[in-house]
Image: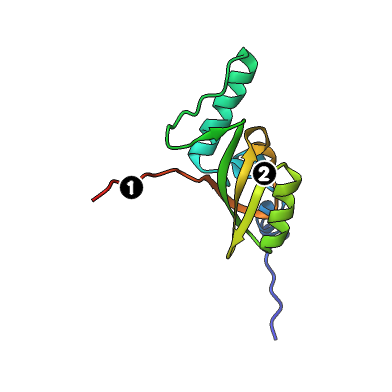
Amino acid sequence: MGVCRRPLRFWRVLLVLSLTPLMGVGAAPAHDRVGAKLAPELRALYEAYRVARESGRPVMSPDPAIPIVEDRVLIDAVASGDVGDLRRSLVDLGMREAVTAGRIVSGQLPIAAIPAMAALAELRFARAAISTTRRPR
């Protein structure tokens, strides 16, 4: 049958375009992808924690629905794969009272460990466990 006789330049361009996603060119920076794993309230809480530490003041939650106990926050983290792997990694970061339900790990994580948690390959997404109250009927 016929042989494809496209110019060499065509093949070079095709090769570069096909390899670009693998090389990370044009993709979001790594820190943006890591931050995308965190709900906005966790990013805001870590920033408040960082500022409080630098100024020597106690940490105040930017959201009253997110309680802080001894520089820890209750989180719900969704596993990207095996939930047991995520649980072990979070416990290694200092999580207390870690429990699992389906693909979710919940527990008290040190606020200082939020960036390290976001970098875990086992993590798909994490959010603060918001406290709610019920009104009597």
Residue, x 66% and y 32% (percent of image)? 112
Viewer-side residue, 119 vs 68: 68
The image position of residue 131, as x and y in percent, is: 44, 43
The N terminus lies in quadrant: bottom right
Q: Which residue is mark 2?
A: 117
Left or right of 27? Residue 136 is left
Q: Is residue 68 above or below residue 85?
A: above
Q: Earlier in the sequence, mark 1 or mark 2?
A: 2
Q: Which image quarter: residue 2?
A: bottom right
Q: Is residue 16 visible?
A: no
Viewer-side residue, 15 vs 5: 15
Mark 1 and mark 2: Cα distance apart in space: 31 Å
Describe the element under mark 2 as helix, strand or loop.
helix
Check the image and name the residue furthest to the right: 92
The image position of residue 132, as x and y in percent, is: 39, 44
| Crowding near the residue tagged with mark 1, few <14, some 14–19, many ≥20 C-alpha atoms within 10 Å | few
Q: Is residue 116 visible?
A: yes
Describe the element under mark 1 as helix, strand or loop.
loop
The image position of residue 94, as x and y in percent, is: 72, 41
* Amino acid of disc 1: Arg
Q: Is residue 82 above or below residue 28?
A: below
The image position of residue 4, as x and y in percent, is: 69, 74
**Disc number for residue 76:** none
* Amino acid of disc 2: Met
Residue, x 50% and y 46% (percent of image)? 129
Viewer-side residue, 108 vs 9: 108
Q: Is residue 41 above or below residue 22?
A: above
Colour mode of the rendering: rainbow
Check the image and name the residue furthest to the front: 136
Q: Which residue is mark 1?
A: 134
